[in-house]
Each structure stands twice: as C-alpha cells, then as structure tokens.
Image (cartoon, coloured by chain):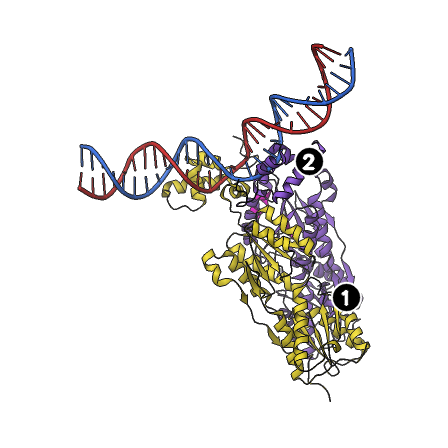
Chain colours: A yellow, B purple, C blue, D red
DNA sequence: CATTTCCTAGAAAACGTTTACATTTGCATC
DNA sequence: GATGCAAATGTAAACGTTTTCTAGGAAATG
C-alpha cells in the first residue's frame, strides 16, 4: 500500500474509512444522504491521507470541469487586467478556475486558443468585443459552450454581452466637446482593424460631429497602438498636418497621456490651445498634468458581472444576458471652452 | 450514430478512417510509426468530424495535463499583470494552458488556491515571493509538483526562483541617494506583512544607510498599500512628522507617484527640496512631473524565463534554477544632489 | 407479525483516452 | 521455401472518479 508515491486515491480513503468508494464520493460531493458518523470517518480519513481528488477523472466521469476560459487581447493593458482580476476573484469564490489566454488582438490566434480551451473542457468562454472568426463561434456553439462578450453591448445571437455601447461613448465625447464650443476636431483612435470597440468609438465620435453639421471627411483621424509613444506621434501628426484642431478625442488614456506629453514638449498649452479627452479612466488619468478628462470604463464591474452570468443557472441567465453598463464622463483639467 | 450531440469521439474518427482507436491516438500524438496513407485518412476524418479530443480523458490516462497554475497577489498591479502576460504567451506557444489565481497578498487564501490547482492537476505552479505557508509547499512537494518563485532570488530548497535580490535593490537606492549627498532619509514601503519583497527592499535600504553611519532607528519608515492615495498620505506623514527628509525611497512607483502629487499640493519642490526614488519602472514613471527616477523590475523577463524553466526537460532544468536578474537604476528627474 | 416504505451504502458500469502487449504483414536471409 | 525480424496496426486493459441500480436493514404501517 505505497500511498506515499502518487498520493492517495479515493479507494485508499474508502479503505481507511471502512466504506465503499461510492460513499466517499458522496461525502466529497456534499451528497446529503450519508450517515453522519460515516461522513465523519470519511472526512477524517481524507484529512489523514492528505487526499486530493483527481480533477481529470472527476471531470471525465461527471462531464463537469468547473473550468472557464478567457481570451483577451493583452494583460499589459490595465483595462483588461482589471477585468480579469474581478472575473477570477468572483469565479474562485465558487471554486471555478480560470484559464486565461492573450491573443494580441489577432482573431486567428484567438481561434487557436479557443480550440485549446474547448479541448480543456471549459464550460464558458469570456471574449472581448464582438469581432471574432465565425469558425470560433461555430466551434463554441457546436460544443454547447456558452460565451460572453465584454467591452461591448452588441450581444451575439446566442450568447451574452456585458459591456457598454462604444458608439454612444464616442458620441458622448463629441457632444461634450461641442458644448464647450469647439469646432475643429481631431481623433487619435486605437487600431480599428478587427477591433469593433476602437471602431465604434471613432464612429460615434464622427457621427455626432456630423449630426452637428461638421464635414466628416474634414475630421482628421489617426490610429495608434495603446502605447505612450504612439500617442505622442499621433498627436504630432494631428498638430502639424492641416489645420490644427482645438479638441482631440483619444481612444485610450495611454494615447491621451502620450498626446499631452507631446504638447508639453512642443509648447502647446493644454487645455489652453487644445482640449484632450481620454478613454478608460485608468489610474494614470490622475497623473498627467494637467489631469486628464476621460470616459470611465467599468472594467471591474464587467468582470464581476460576467462571472455572475457564468455562475448563474440556465433559468437565471435569461435575465442576465445583454447587460449594458453606463459610461461616465470624468471631467478633470485637460478640457476647456474653446478660446475665441 | 448521432455524433451531432456531444461531439465526435475518438472511436468515431477511427470508424470513419477505417482503423483502430489506437492508431487515431497515435496520429493525434504525432507518433512517427504510422503509415503515411493511414495518417492521412485519420487527419481527414478528424477534420471532417470537427473532432476535438477530450482533455480530461487524455489527462486521466496519460497523467499529463499540460496545465500550469500561477498564484499572484493581484492583476491590478501592472508589475504582476505584465509578468503573467509574458508567462502565458510563452506557455501557449507549447499548448500549455495557464490557470491564474489572485490571492490579494493573503497566504492563507493562497493555500486554498494551491489546493484547487493541485486538484486540477497542474504540473507546475508559479508563485510570487518566498513567503508561503509551509503547508502550501508541503502539498506541492508531496504531489511532486514543482514550483517557481518569482520577484525574488531567494530560491526554495527544492524548486526554482526567477527574480532579483530585493535587499540588494534597496541598497542600490540608498547608495545612489547617499552619493548625491543626502543625509536625511525616509521610506515609504509597501505593506511588509507576509511580503518578503517589500520587507527586503526596506531592509536593504536601511542596511546600506546604517553601513554609512546613519542610525537605523532615526530613519522614518511608513507603510502603504500600492495605491496613489496611500502614497500621498504616507508622504504627508513623512513630511509633517519629525525632521523632514531630503530623500525618500518608495517601494513602488505608485506610491512614489502619490508622494509626488502630495508634494505638488503642499508646495514642496521635487527634487529641489526632496528627492524621490520609485520602484518598478512602470509606464507611469514617465508620466509624473517631474519624471520619476526608479529601479526597473524585469517583469516581462521573469514571466518568460519562468515559462522556459517550466517547459524545460528535467535535465535542462538543473541549469535554469535560481536565475537572478539585474535591477537597473533609471535616473530621471525626481532626484538631485542635496541642497546645501 | 407481515408488509411496505424509507434511507443508507455497496457493486459495478461507465466516462474517452493512452499504452503495453499481441498480432499481422511484408521482407530479407539462409 | 522455411525462418526470423522489423514495422505497422489492433486488442484490451487501464487511468480515478461518479452514478445507476440494487440490496440490506430499520422504521412505519396495517
């Protein structure tokens, strides 16, 4: 009986507790119909042997893995890291484990990772945005794995969405700047290729401007990756090419922070000569000087609510699908009425 | 043959490819000794059925899960998120999945999470720091699961460490400030309870000052959580109580950023009246004004190297254990020679 | 006291793979 | 032409649980 080696198994516990494996299994799974004294023997034996159940065997037999997968663009961007943090925290309260994968904004890579997740037997998948390979969704549906979109309110046919309306958020930024009297705009968007959120924000911004009589084509839009340097470079292009805007909307606080840094270096007053609005409300929004006016993305809430959806029973879920969260405008110091 | 339902199984593939399950298994696992034409039939059948192997069954039979676990304090702190990002990226190249857990700096919670990871059958565990419950390590060792410490160079008896020497880093900060001529110091440390890294930095800092003749007890040390607000509050205490220091070392860039904000608000010149050194070299170090002098933590490298260790064969591993990375001092604008 | 009911616990059959071992086949060798 | 060998494939027994079904008593009922 060399239990030392691989570790004790269920039968070892059964033997020590002087009962059948079935009974041990019942105790472990909280099955109520087992005598108290027997239950006690089992619990004691379990502890004595340091028994840890074999999850694979358990999953194989019961067809329940208690595993959830998440595929996000990157963990380097706080906005995603925070969502995952909240998601994991909530899931682990219920002993559900989270496998995380980063796709680097590449939907083909995302497909491969989804495949691996399916193979692992995840019961749900958290995805970011609504742009995915049809094959990815088809695979999940075929395997009866439900998935949740985040950072968007555009819900899939069959599935859930916990997020916000990026287009509306873009409109909000435009509305705010218009109300400050601005009439010459620019935008630094995230890379919109395969990124519905970045594209949505841009479209909303331009739509609202158009509705107020601006000519869409005359609003310069440059795209950059979510890095300080790109923000700097993009701002430079905006300020040096064509007529200089007095108000710039950035698709991320990082881009905005870079833009502010450029202005400092170039001697352009913020918000005196140009107003800047960011997006995300990261911690850095309080660190730029002047402090950054921005739109708050409820990353933590999304993670928590996505977890709640996943943990809910099928009947509860019906109410939880399609949850649209509000985006708040946080006014700080980088915006001001246009100078006459 | 209702394959539609649960999805095709290995036997279904075998039937369609007109061979035995064993052969299908061999093809799937890249076993070389299978005829090319048969292999081709199998591959075709696999694709046609959209077959995805059952990971649980596979893991149960082969005793290999290709699963790795990581338990970190939080994903909200960029320094950890970045490490995990790199770790995951490297692991997924080899089709190894990463389960992540956050412990919120609580080593009891860490134990529970380690337990769950063991149950899931992870083959390795990545831990942060060297302070863990003995029970946690005992469990891992008993189950023959190897673990890797990160953010520290203090390696466990049986196990690996990829990180840096926190004590030495603290000494570096002290040395640098001493060389600038400072003689009145203060420190804003992270919470040192159950946190060997925070404690190590503090000790190193104080040790080096002591070696230069300072009286250890006369150096005020306040602790704060890694949040802007705490940095602000701690700096206030440091500047208002006792004799005012001319040089402050902070256990994190976040704390340093808060400290700088306090100085702005209080009208204290940085670095004119007080020099500030941070720790981590986060993106925010470039966003404070003045820009923050700090020590760079190689988060991405740690993640990558930890992954390399995990993926290495047992024989290769011997060389990879105990990897100490260098900490670089990044001089920016928050430090200056002491004013006479 | 016989019969039913209820509850607990055991026996044994799954779950979908991998793999040790056995078998077949084709070839080369003597 | 028999024999041996290697390579390719098949057979069947695991892997460690959960769960269905059945059995054994004890308690309740008539």
A233 sits to left or right of B10: right
Between the C-alphas of marks 2 and 1, the distance is: 67 Å
Which quarter of the figure is the C terminus of chain B placed in?
bottom right
- SS under mark 2: helix
- Looking at marks 2 and 1 on the same chain, the residue that comes earlier in the sequence is marked by 2
Please provide percent x and percent y for residue B168.
73, 56
Residues rendered magenta in the picture:
B126-140
Please provide percent x and percent y for residue A78.
65, 63
Q: Are marks 2 and 1 on the same chain?
A: yes
Report which residue position mark 1 lands on: B177
Pinpoint the chain carrying mark 2.
B
B45 sits to left or right of B325: left
The quadrant in which residue B240 appears is: bottom right
Please provide percent x and percent y for residue C14.
49, 37
Q: Nearer the viewer, residue B75 or B30?
A: B30
Report which residue position mark 2 lands on: B39
């Amino acid at each position: 009986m060399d239990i030392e080696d691989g570790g004790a198994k269920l039968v070892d516990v059964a033997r020590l507790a002087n009962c059948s494996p079935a009974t041990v299994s019942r105790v472990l799974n909280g099955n109520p119909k087992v005598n108290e004294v027997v239950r006690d023997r089992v619990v004691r034996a379990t502890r004595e042997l340091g028994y840890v159940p074999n999850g694979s065997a358990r999953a194989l037999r019961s067809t329940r893995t208690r595993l959830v997968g998440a595929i996000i663009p990157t963990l380097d961007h706080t906005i995603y890291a925070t969502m995952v943090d909240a998601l994991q925290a909530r899931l682990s309260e219920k002993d559900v484990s989270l496998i995380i994968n980063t796709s680097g904004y590449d939907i083909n890579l995302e497909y491969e990772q989804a495949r691996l997740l399916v193979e692992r037997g995840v019961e749900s998948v958290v995805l970011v945005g609504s742009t995915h390979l049809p094959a990815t969704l088809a695979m999940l549906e075929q395997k009866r794995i439900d998935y949740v979109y985040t950072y968007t309110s555009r819900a899939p046919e069959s599935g859930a969405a916990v997020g916000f309306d990026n287009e509306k958020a873009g409109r909000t930024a435009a509305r705010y700047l218009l109300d400050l009297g601005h009439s010459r705009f620019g935008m630094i968007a995230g890379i919109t290729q395969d990124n519905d959120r970045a594209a949505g924000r841009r479209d909303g911004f331009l739509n609202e401007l158009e509705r107020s009589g601006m000519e869409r084509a005359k609003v310069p839009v440059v795209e950059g990756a979510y890095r300080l340097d790109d923000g700097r470079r993009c701002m430079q292009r905006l300020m040096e090419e064509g007529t200089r805007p007095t108000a710039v909307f950035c698709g991320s606080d990082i881009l905005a922070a870079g833009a502010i840094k450029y202005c400092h270096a170039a001697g352009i007053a913020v918000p005196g000569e140009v107003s800047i609005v960011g997006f995300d409300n990261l911690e850095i929004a309080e660190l730029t000087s002047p402090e950054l006016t921005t739109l708050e993305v409820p990353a933590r809430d999304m993670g928590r609510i996505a977890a709640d959806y996943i943990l809910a029973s099928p009947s509860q879920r019906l109410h939880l699908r399609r949850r649209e969260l509000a985006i708040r405008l946080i006014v700080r110091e980088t915006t001001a009425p246009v100078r006459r």
